[in-house]
Image (cartoon, grey):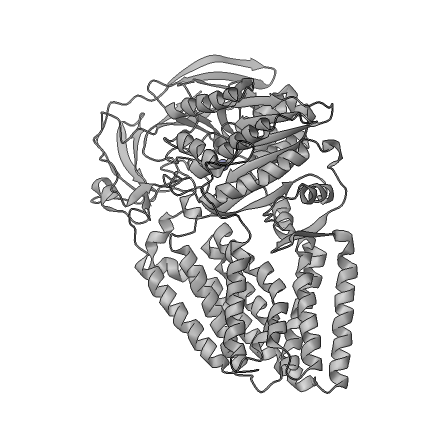
């Protein structure tokens, strides 16, 4: 390889990676002045700004203000709106009174309707909900405005559902799908969501059947920046999910597309989910999906979206969404295997391959895989030991998380160059056999067990062409070989980033292994590089550099604030009070209350409150008694019918509260309902931590329980009632947090909680 070809192709590889990321989503540009008939990100941003001024979770004062803002905006477009309100408890015993906002654009036809969906509630208690999900609401408001300004009548009805209480238990979606008359005729739902505050928006299909008709029509709708792949689709289908669309699929058998961005996961559900931190490109990306899909599906036949078969698909720069039926997979696999065999034979014939060197080719590959696998697997537990403060970021993705990903990817590349440097004597064709065999085995395995990942065959085809070239030519064109690495680069580089971002840094091993696997597919190019040791050294130097940078950013600051938590817990029965926290590392703010005589709570001291990660208190300390009342419990009915005891209880708040957790010690609950909502037998039999229900309270509503138990069983209830006003309650003088700290998300926080036990 000529001297300059090495640095030039290497730079081209770097540029291709950059371009792969860059070209997958739009770049935000000021567009306030675009005509009314076009979607404007700036106009959508105005909605985000209005909606995300204050936390607006169910039961919070701003919740109603946000609802009124959305209703006003829809009515300003000339649409008639209606509210649908009622209690539901979802699948996990999370009760709330949801109030959905609904509007409809009447279509000219009689077919199924298209539904646009986003939720307007924010996560309790501190999230400002700019990304999650004001961005979704804003996308729909601006999209519908754009659509209406074109003044054409759609064939299908377009239903706009701005749902409520998504964050609590998908209650609004539950209410609509199961109780609203419009739900029966919905053919397709488009849901706009966020689980972080930036990055590309991924399209995710929700269906009970196959995806091929959905992919066919999505492709026909032709959104400009499709980011989607069937690997994620296959994995998603295997996991229990919890988006609003899950309710549409399970309860209504309605097909759906989710559009959600997940980067900057550390902002998710925090006070940092604010207007300033919302990535403008992500919002523009949502708009770039909505408009073509709205135009297409408002006229398409929505009765024809269900299909028995699946497609594999992935997005590719310049082309968009590539798809092929699952039915082709084994034929493709057989062809690829056959071509590999033919190339092996021709390699032997041309004396370019020999068994000994082919066998040697396994050593650097396995060496790199083992070293990078082990390092990827253990790096996060070790980093957690070195930086115990990371334990307080419950999302598992730290503020310096991207730096860590970059560092370990560079480390992996360094190791790969080092391993192959040691085998420089082995020729490139011989070195390539082991990676191709491994990838062939991988493709076979995914074809059988994870067919959504069968598009792995595409980079494999490019690698086989390279294999053919290096067998037939002694000094092939480095630029041609570089060109043939593009499928691997553009398909795998996004995954290398996405796994640790989406699943947390504990999944770094996915990034290091996938980097290694991508590297070995690029061996036709890298194999010809002289001085691989220099690249190894470069990789390691950069690794150290980025680790130092991550270290310098490992502390907390205003922009990278520390999640902290404080609760005041009053035991009403025993007349004792405690400060409590979930923090592993206290800051000055929490240490004011838990610094001196903090204790680790004993098992059984407190019930585990329901939260995303089932987080328990880490420390408690004695607190002064305050005059705070627990709820008043009334027995409305206690009677025996045959062998069953029927018990009716009403729990009345005696102060302004946000939430009530009811625990019932292990007894056989035959039936139960809360505020008229029956809880499923399946849920009752599989309750966790004895929790019966969490009621997210609005307007200081009462909680009415109906329990049916065997005739002689005593019923013991533990009631944990909480308000999120610890920092504002006049009985306390808890100061505001310092600027480098935010309320810990996902858990009951900044709360005054009473606990009491009642036995009937
Ligand atoms: Zn959300």
Q: Nearer the viewer, residue 55 or 474?
A: 474
For image coordinates 33% across by 55% down, the residue present is 388
Residue 44 in percent (x, y) is at: 47, 34
Residue 320 in percent (x, y) is at: 64, 51
Asked if 410 appears above or below 91 in the picture, the reply is below
Residue 217 in percent (x, y) is at: 70, 41
**Left of 389 or right of it: where is 462?**
right
Q: Nearer the viewer, residue 503 or 217?
A: 217
User: Can residue 380 be seen here?
Assistant: no
For image coordinates 59% across by 42% down, the residue present is 240
What is the number of callouts on the image?
0
**Left of 174 or right of it: where is 542?**
left
Q: Quadrant of the N terminus?
A: bottom right
Asked if 100 appears above or below 502 in the picture, the reply is above
Q: Quadrant of the C terminus?
A: top left
For image coordinates 46% across by 46% down, the residue present is 198
Asked if 559 appears above or below 426 in the picture, the reply is above
Asked if 465 appears above or below 278 in the picture, the reply is below
User: Can residue 50 be seen here?
Assistant: yes
For image coordinates 38% across by 48% down, the residue present is 393
Q: Nearer the viewer, residue 476 or 208?
A: 476
Residue 8 in percent (x, y) is at: 52, 73
């Amino acid at each position: 390889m000529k001297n300059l070809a090495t640095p030039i192709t290497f730079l081209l590889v770097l540029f291709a990676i950059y371009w792969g990321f860059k070209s997958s989503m739009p770049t935000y540009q000021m567009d306030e002045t675009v005509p009314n008939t076009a979607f404007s990100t700036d106009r959508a941003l105005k909605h985000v700004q209005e909606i995300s001024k204050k936390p607006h979770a169910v039961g919070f004062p701003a919740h109603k203000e946000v609802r009124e803002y959305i209703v006003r905006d829809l009515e300003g477009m000339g649409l008639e709106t209606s509210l649908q309100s009622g209690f539901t408890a979802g699948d996990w015993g999370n009760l709330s009174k949801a109030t959905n906002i609904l509007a409809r654009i009447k279509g000219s036809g009689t077919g199924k309707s298209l539904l646009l969906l986003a939720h307007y509630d924010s996560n309790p208690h501190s999230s400002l909900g700019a990304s999650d999900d004001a961005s979704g609401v804003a996308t729909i408001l601006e999209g519908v405005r754009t659509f209406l300004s074109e003044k054409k009548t759609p064939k299908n009805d377009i239903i706009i559902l701005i749902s409520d209480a998504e964050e609590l238990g998908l209650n609004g979606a539950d209410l609509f799908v199961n109780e609203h008359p419009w739900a029966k005729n919905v053919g397709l739902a488009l849901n706009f969501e966020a689980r972080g505050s930036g990055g590309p928006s991924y399209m995710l299909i929700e269906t009970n059947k196959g995806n091929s008709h959905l992919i066919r029509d999505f492709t026909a709708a032709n959104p400009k920046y499709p980011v989607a792949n069937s690997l994620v689709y296959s994995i998603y289908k295997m996991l229990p999910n919890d988006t609003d669309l899950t309710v549409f699929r399970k309860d209504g058998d309605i097909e759906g597309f989710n559009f959600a961005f997940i980067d900057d996961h550390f902002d998710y559900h925090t006070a940092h989910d604010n207007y300033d931190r919302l990535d403008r490109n992500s919002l523009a990306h949502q708009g770039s999906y909505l408009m073509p899909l709205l135009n297409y599906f408002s006229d398409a036949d929505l009765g024809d979206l269900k299909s028995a078969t699946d497609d594999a698909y992935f997005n590719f720069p310049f082309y968009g969404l590539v798809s092929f039926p699952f039915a082709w997979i084994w034929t493709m696999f057989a062809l690829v295997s056959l071509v590999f065999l033919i190339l092996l034979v021709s390699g032997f014939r041309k004396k370019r391959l020999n068994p000994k060197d082919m066998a040697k080719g396994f050593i650097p590959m396995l060496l790199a895989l083992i070293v990078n696998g082990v390092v990827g697997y253990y790096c996060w537990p070790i980093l957690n030991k070195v930086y115990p403060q990371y334990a307080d970021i419950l999302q598992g993705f730290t503020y310096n998380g991207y730096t860590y990903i970059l560092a370990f990817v560079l480390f992996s590349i360094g190791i790969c160059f080092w391993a192959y440097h040691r085998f420089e004597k082995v020729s490139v064709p011989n070195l390539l056999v082991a990676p191709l065999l491994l990838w062939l085995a991988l493709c076979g395995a995914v074809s059988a067990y994870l067919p959504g990942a069968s598009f792995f065959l595409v980079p494999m085809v490019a690698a086989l062409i390279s294999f053919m070239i290096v067998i037939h030519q002694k000094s092939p064109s480095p630029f041609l070989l570089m060109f043939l690495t593009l499928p691997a680069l553009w398909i795998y580089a996004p995954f290398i980033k996405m796994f640790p971002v989406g699943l947390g840094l504990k999944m770094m091993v996915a990034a290091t292994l996938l980097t290694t696997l991508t590297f070995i597919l690029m061996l036709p190019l890298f194999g010809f590089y002289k001085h691989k040791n220099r690249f190894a050294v470069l990789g390691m130097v950069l690794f150290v550099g980025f680790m130092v940078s991550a270290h310098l950013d490992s502390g907390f600051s205003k922009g990278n604030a520390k999640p902290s938590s404080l609760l005041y817990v009053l035991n009403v029965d025993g007349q004792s009070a405690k400060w409590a926290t979930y923090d592993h590392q206290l800051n000055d703010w929490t240490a004011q209350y838990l610094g001196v005589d903090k204790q680790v709570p004993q098992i059984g001291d407190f019930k585990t409150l329901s939260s995303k990660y089932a987080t328990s208190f880490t420390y408690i300390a004695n607190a002064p008694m305050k005059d705070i009342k627990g709820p008043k419990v009334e027995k409305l009915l206690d009677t025996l019918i045959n062998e069953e005891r029927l018990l009716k209880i009403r729990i009345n708040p005696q102060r302004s509260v946000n939430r009530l957790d009811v625990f019932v010690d292990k007894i056989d609950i035959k039936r139960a309902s809360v505020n008229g909502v029956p809880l499923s037998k399946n849920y009752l039999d599989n309750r966790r931590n004895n929790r019966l229900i969490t009621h997210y309270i609005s307007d200081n509503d009462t909680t009415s329980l109906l329990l049916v138990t065997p005739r002689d069983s005593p019923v013991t209830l533990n009631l944990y009632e909480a308000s999120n006003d610890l920092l504002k309650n006049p009985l306390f003088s808890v100061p505001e947090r310092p600027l480098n700290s935010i309320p810990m998300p996902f858990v009951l926080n900044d709360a005054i909680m009473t606990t009491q036990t009642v036995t009937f």
